[in-house]
Amino acid sequence: MLAFQEFQHQMAAHLRDPHHTRRPPGVPKRRMGVYNELLFNNVCGFLDSCFPVSRQLLGDARWRRLCRTFYRDWPSHTPWFREIPRELVRYLSEHHIAQPLPVWLADLARYEWAELAVDVMDVTPPPHDPQGDMMLSSVCLNPARVDVVSPWPVHRIGPDWQPRQAEPTFLVVFRDAQLDVQFAEINAVTAHVLSLLDQGLSGQQAFAQLATDMKHPDPQALQGFGQQLLISLREQGVLLGTRT
Amino acid sequence: MVHTTFNPAGLGFRRELIPALQQAVPPEIGFFEIAPENWAGMGGRSAHTLRAFTERYPFVCHGLSLSLGGPGALDETLLRRTRDFMRTHGITLFTEHLSWCADDSHLYDLLPIPMTEEAVRYTAERIARAQDILGMQIGVENASTYIAPPGAEMTEPEFVRAVVERADCLLHLDVNNIYVNSRNFGFDPHAYLAQLPLERTCYVHVAGHCVEEDGLVIDTHGSDVIDPVWQLLQAAYQRIGRPVPTCLERDFNIPDLPTLVQEVAHIAHLQHQAFGAQAVAQWGAQAHSVNRQVA
């Protein structure tokens, strides 16, 4: 370490945890306070705007405390400001957090983040035929998409209602052709079909596999149901057509 | 509608302003500035909107996350993505702060570098590496600071000069930052200005700030530009002696576009006063053609 970097490490440590670390030597309290406030407020600005529901449900004091321990304990390596919220989602799901938090908070935060992530996701749809027969050819999924799978109905959580019991929930957050973000609630079977299609299967192959997985008594009936499902998902914008 | 000439007077491009700018871009605005950290690597509506503007107007990239003087490794991925982003949008100028913002991970704001000989060598080396990756000289900005890191071996203008000369980079001059620091540390901003390597100036910032109850000046970019800062800009133009693109930064308490544009128009007015209409127009036509060729 170079000599001048010792100061930088001391300052960084103090910025992350001003209540439990010493100010760097020679730095007046008032001036250090400016930096403590500027940096933490900057990070909070990105978090507050991405997670309005989580923030409201925790209340300002608990939310701010969460933001503080995130800034203190979670090393964010991304230089992109829009990815700071993704780092909070990772912190909530991967880090041991001492503060008591609702059991569904990590999933709610991921759902709130998905809207931002899908809005700015830098993906272009692969070549596809919107009119192609999705039962016969490999199906093209909308790549501007985040699948939210949660034991909690995160999309219904709000100030007036919070879940007491788990209820397996499958949501697709995606960007439509007009570049608007859309939300679709699907069921476990549809979620399974999407994961099969994501592997490059055609509709027929996916529903044959589904029949096997479900031990379905009438695989042929499943194929008829499947065609309708695929068309409906294409109309919504979750599927784009067939790969070409 | 294509801009054929433009003043080297610009405005920070902010999402809040986009609806008004989509109606019409006031002719006073000669270019826009964006932070690659806020726009690069994005798809969707943001990317479409930005593209519609970069196809018609010159843009400048002003970085925030590079941490030129920071103890962490230089983020070469960020540099390469910034380079690609600039190519995509035909942007030919990149500037960053003479500061640091990360150790092994990001702190997300700009912090002062201890002004030592060792820090000069270290920072200049990283700037040179950044210039290699970007394939161009970059501008490095004198930063606003609230503390003077202990152990300084030189004054701030000496530090700035030593770094830019050693790195062989350009100077991004921020006159508001000089003013803020002069108030917070008690020095003469005009004397400071005179010591900077102004012959290397490629770009200028002007902005407003706020004054706290105890007199401490905070570089908020949230108020109108005050007269002493305009006077510093005039003094800088006199010393530089040629038109340089100058951007108004406004990040908080953003007024409506016509109000903001008055300050951009004032930049253009000072440029005409200092350099004459002909020199300014020549500069604008040349810069515009460079920008269009790249695009």
Image: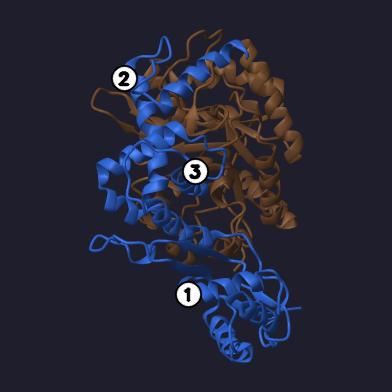
Chain colours: A blue, B brown
Image point (37%, 52%), residue name: A105
The reply to whether callout 1 and callout 2 are in contact (CB within 8 Å) is no
With respect to residue B164, does A143 lie above or below? below
> What is the chain identity of the residue bearing mark 2?
A
- How far from the left and from the top, in percent, is residue B295? 71, 58
What is the secondary structure assignment of the residue under circle 1? loop
Q: Residue at x 69, y 69 (%)?
A: A199
Q: Quadrant of the C terminus of chain A?
A: bottom right
Q: CA distance from mark 1 to mark 2?
A: 56 Å
Q: Which class describes the residues within 10 Å of circle 3: few (<14), some (14-19), or many (20+)?
A: few
- Measured along the vertical axis of the image, is residue A200 above or below residue A58? below
Does residue A178 show up?
A: no
Q: Amino acid at mark 1?
A: Asn
Q: Earlier in the sequence, mark 1 or mark 3?
A: 3
Q: Nearer the viewer, mark 1 or mark 2?
A: 1
In the structure shown, which secondary structural element does the residue marked by tag 3 occupy? helix
Q: Amino acid at mark 3?
A: Glu
Q: Tell if the residue under mark 1 belongs to the same chain as the one under mark 3.
A: yes
Where is mark 2, residue-wise? A30
Residue B164: quadrant of the picture: top right
Residue picked out by circle 3: A94
Numbered tag placed on residue B211 in the rendering = none
Between B14 and A47, the residue placed more toward the observer is: A47
Which mark is in front, 2 or 3? 3
Instruction: Check the residue under mark 1 and report the chain it is in.
Output: A
Residue found at x 37% / y 21%: A32
Give residue B102's position: percent from left, percent from top: 54, 30
Disc 1 target residue = A187
Which percent across, then down, holds residue B34? Answer: 55, 48
Residue flagged by tag 2: what amino acid is it? Arg
Compute the Cα span from label 2 to label 3.
35 Å
